[in-house]
Amino acid sequence: MSAPRTVLLTGAAGGVGTLMRELLPPYGYELRLLDVVPVRGEPNAIVADLADRAALREAVRGVDAIVHLAGISLEADFEKIVAANIAGTYNLYEAAREEGVRRVVFASSNHAVGFTRQPREGEPLIPVDTPHRPDTFYGLSKCFGEDLAQLYWDLHGIETVSVRIGSCFPEPTSVRMLSMWLSPADCARLLHATLTAEGVAHTVAYGSSANTRAWWDLSTARALGYDPQDDSEVHAEKLIAARGLPEKGSADDLYLGGHFCVNPPRWPH
């Protein structure tokens, strides 16, 4: 499809949202920004909670697509996760349905499959159709979001790419992140691909750079037109020298979700 002109970016004040506010417009997008808190330097941003269905409907009115980054991005009490990530995502999809928006990019997470074992050398990369194995209530909410996206495609013809984001930071900050890192520039490349690919129906794609130490299969992302340019390996020597390799048999050594499986960081961070 041709590039959408106007894209609603939810979670615009968050970590990934802040990076994408700078990196997506050069691809030709006019961003409409939404967050539950004011977006610094953006006086026209919409300040609204995902529970406010009237505000969401107004926010999506007239946009060509939605990039949905909003919600709680770490572990929290179940009730908080339900309100922000489960009910909130449902409310957004309902607004999209009511206003006729046909393309959503949903920020899923590696934590939807966090209890999946890391592949060892010589073993195949983790495919996108590996069963859901969430490591937290947060990861569980991302499983729900992926299934909700499938339902809204099957019922209402709203296309979604669910991107299981690894870790999107200017550079990796842990040894585990060497396998999961999505550089900001590659994140923008991936989002552009998800917004412009034809006939995505509901597609699940892993979101990381072309990392030498990658654990998962980027083939569905590449099929959308994603061509990652960065590799975390340039940071590996410094990180390993500073942190050391994960202890054998630890969660960081065994599972895709690493320490989220045993001691997840909690919201707010």
Image: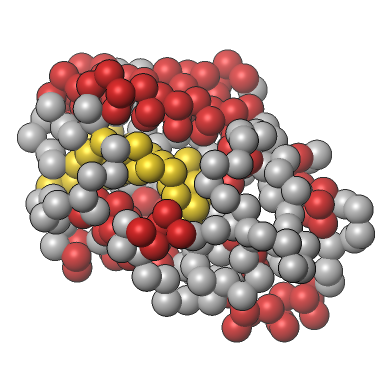
Viewer-nearest residue: 220 or 80: 220
| Residue at x 45% of width, y 32% of height | 146
Measured along the vertical axis of the image, is residue 240 above or below residue 8?
Answer: below
| Residue at x 56% of width, y 64% of height | 181
Viewer-nearest residue: 263 or 255: 255
Residue 33: image quadrant is: top left
Q: Is residue 77 left or right of residue 90?
A: right
Viewer-nearest residue: 78 or 112: 112
- Measured as percent of width and height from the top left, residue 89 is found at 38, 26
Name the image colouring: secondary structure
- Measured as percent of width and height from the top left, residue 11 is found at 37, 41
- Measured as percent of width and height from the top left, residue 139 is found at 60, 34
Locate the C terminus by quadrant.
top right
- Farthest residue toward the right? 248
Viewer-nearest residue: 32 or 152: 152
| Residue at x 44% of width, y 50% of height | 205
| Residue at x 54% of width, y 76% of height | 231
Residue 245: image quadrant is: bottom right
Query: Can residue 32 be seen by looking at this rendering?
Result: no
- Measured as percent of width and height from the top left, residue 110 is found at 58, 46
